[in-house]
Image (cartoon, rainbow, N blue to C red):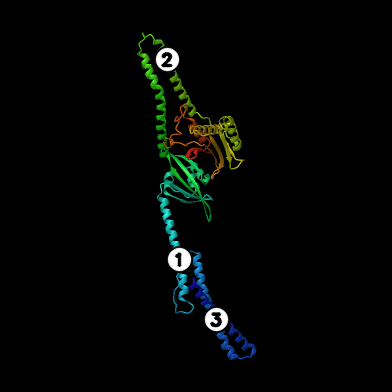
Amino acid sequence: MIKFEIITNRHWSRLLLRIFVFTALCILFCYFLWGQPNYLRLTYTGVALLLAGIELVRYFNRLYGDFNSFLLSLLQEDFTLRFKVDPKKEGNTGVYYETLNLITQKFRDISLAKEEEHQFLSMLIKQMNVGIIVITDKQEITMVNDAFLTITNQKVVNSIQSIERRNKGLAQILTEIKAGEVKLLKMEFNRRIRQLSLHASAIKTNTGIIRLITIQDIRQELDRNEWDSWQKLIRVLTHEIMNSVTPISSLSDTLLYMDSSATDWNNRVQIGLEAIKNRSEGLLKFTNTYRELTKIPLPHFEQIQVKSLFEMIIEMYSGEVEKDHLKINYELSDHELEVLGDKEMLERILINLIKNGIEASNHTGKIPSILLRGFKGNDGKLIITIQDNGNGIAEEIRDQIFIPFFTTKKEGSGIGLSLCRQMALLHGGTLNLDSTEFGTIATFTI
């Protein structure tokens, strides 16, 4: 930087010297023309003035013309321009042009590094098993990898219209999906149903906002999870049914081969039949509970004020607050928060979760304390959390708490949390339970 400044000053000195000579010759020419006319000297002075003017223009063009070429090459991202370094030649100082060449080389190195990085990222994207497509805010497609073409059964993708010709549903989702959203799409390909998951992210660039959308075939993962769920459900069903059927079978066998001549035969038969009746009623109750789990009505959506919902739920527990010193409070990020949902279902979800929290706290011997929170997430969805002061969820049962009929309570049916999660899903939301050192936190997103 210092060398470049010194060379610049040297060029300015030479330029000023030429301007001074040219100005002096102009004055002398005027003097010989009007002051003391002398045509011979006037001719010599005129020739010298012409040569000085030509040299001034030539020097100026050489100095700033090269510099303009240098700036223009940078502007056009042409980093191939090289100046010949000739330190002996006046006005073409070697260090000056060497500095320009170094600047050009630096820009060339940066450009090559960016190009290598771009090539690496492009190759990486093409090799990924996850489908990727990049769409501008003008619905123009700027990038698509091979995995996207394979997963969506597309041959060539150059516009949304080309996708729409083969799959309108996919084109509609790609057009409408917003940053942070996850959408599912079913596609039939070679007589095989594919379950696709699409996730969108937004990136702000100099030319506008682009959406990067990833697409995955989650059919295999869903099948595996479905199989695991069936295995867990079958184990629970088998356990519950065997608990009822085994005593009935054993008792029936005993009554069948009982000696009818025994003095207490009638009494024992009656007791045995009552036991069979009780176990049969228990099995019937179990099947009715299962029927309830599989026949949840569709929600009737309406605008609900979250503050009113919380206050009504808390009012329902006012008796326990006075009797058992229950502590139940709520916090809202905005008292005007509203949610679109089925009021009865939302009440049922909250009541069930609060009931579980109270029971969890009672097992610790503490006075139950429940805190409801309501706030908006980054994606604009409502998040409701219910926190208790119990001991949390044991590590070994965390992955089982939402399995139908799984329960750790003596009188529990094991469908409360399953019903709550299903109702949350019907609202397009999620329900999860997390264990902390302060208790259990149920997070309901809608």
Which numbered dot is residue 106? 1
Other residues around mark 3 within 10 Å, as few (<14) / some (14–19) / many (≥20) = few
**Nearer the N terminus, badge 3 or badge 2?**
3
Placement of 212 over or under 64, stated as above or below: above
| CB-based contact (under 8 Å), mark 3 and mark 2 | no
Placement of 342 over or under 252, stated as above or below: below
Other residues around mark 2 within 10 Å, as few (<14) / some (14–19) / many (≥20) = few
Which numbered dot is residue 17? 3
Cα–Cα span, label 3 and label 2: 128 Å
**Nearer the N terminus, badge 1 or badge 2?**
1
On the question of residue 81 being in view, the answer is no
| CB-based contact (under 8 Å), mark 3 and mark 1 | no
Amino acid residing under circle 1: Lys
Other residues around mark 1 within 10 Å, as few (<14) / some (14–19) / many (≥20) = few
Instruction: From the top left corner, tell me how far across and down residue 177 is, in percent.
Output: 52, 44
Instruction: From the top left corner, tell me how far across and down residue 213 is, in percent.
Output: 48, 47
Element at badge 3? helix
Numbered-mark total: 3
Q: Residue at x 45, y 62 (%)?
A: 110
Q: Which residue is mark 2?
A: 271
| CB-based contact (under 8 Å), mark 1 and mark 2 | no
Q: Quadrant of residue 85?
A: bottom left
Looking at the picture, tell me which residue is in the foreground, 294 or 45.
294
**Nearer the N terminus, badge 3 or badge 1?**
3
Which marked residue is nearer to the observer: mark 1 or mark 2? 2
Q: Residue at x 41, y 47 (%)?
A: 129
Placement of 28 over or under 300, stated as above or below: below
Cα–Cα span, label 1 and label 2: 98 Å
